[in-house]
Image (cartoon, rainbow, N blue to C red):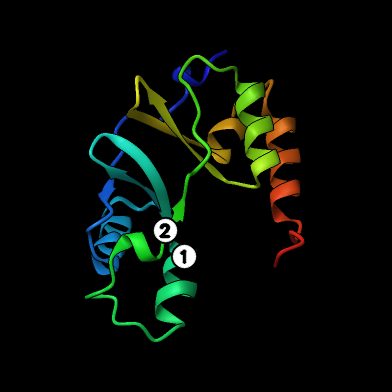
Amino acid sequence: MKVRDIMTTSVVSLSVEDTVVKAASIMKEHNVGSVPVCQGSNVVGIITDRDITLKSVASGVNSNSQNVREVMSSDPALGSPDMSLDDASRMMSEQQIRRLPIVENQQLVGIIALGDLAVQPKSDEKAGNALSNISQQSPQQ
């Protein structure tokens, strides 16, 4: 089975110039915990609810004037629609990420989450292993 078979294709994205408040609003509106960030058509980052909490709110920065670029994680891992679910799960585990933007011809075409992998019969164990690896504290924390 390929990533294209299970990825979510109705993906919202933000611009690097959008505000952190807009990012939080988009997350609330779409009930998601992360949003890919694009510059033009290229995915250049991803912003998560955790990024907003730690890098904006907890730092006391005015989220109305802070750009997404200042808070996002840059150069995110990106997947391909044609990669196998095993490869996607492995990449997510190695990169310690819960969500993987999917690009084709440098265009954002979808996103997969660990939860998407967990409901696949052959991938549920790998998703569980990936989650265990992600949940372990990384050395730089």
Q: For this rendering, which residue is in front, 91 or 39?
A: 39
- Specify few, some or many for label 2: CA neighbours under 10 Å numbering under 14, 14-19, or 20 or more: many
Residue of label 1: 51
Residues under numbered marks 2 and 1 in contact, where contact means CB atoms less than 8 Å apart: yes
Mark 2 or 1: in front is: 2
Please tell me whether residue 9 is drawn above or below residue 105 in the rendered image.
below
Coordinates of residue 104 in the picture (x, y in percent): 38, 21
> Residue at position x 57%, y 46% from top?
98
Coordinates of residue 103 in the picture (x, y in percent): 40, 27
- Specify few, some or many for label 1: CA neighbours under 10 Å numbering under 14, 14-19, or 20 or more: some
Q: For this rendering, which residue is in front, 101 or 15?
A: 15
Q: Is residue 46 left or right of residue 38?
A: right
> Residue at position x 33%, y 56% from top?
27
Image quarter of the N terminus: top right
Residue of label 2: 72
Q: For this rendering, which residue is in front, 65 or 96?
A: 65
Query: Could you tell me which secondary element the residue under label 1 belongs to?
Result: helix
> Residue at position x 49%, y 74% from top?
54
Q: Earlier in the sequence, mark 2 or mark 1?
A: 1
Q: Is residue 122 left or right of residue 46?
A: right
Q: Is residue 101 left or right of residue 117?
A: left
Q: Name the amino acid type tagged 2.
A: Met
The alpha-carbon separation of the residues under discs 2 and 1 comes to: 7 Å
Query: Could you tell me which secondary element the residue under label 2 belongs to?
Result: loop
Image quarter of the C terminus: bottom right
Please tell me whether residue 78 is drawn above or below residue 133 in the rendered image.
above
Residue 49 occupies quadrant: bottom left
Coordinates of residue 93 in the picture (x, y in percent): 69, 40
Q: Name the amino acid type tagged 1.
A: Asp
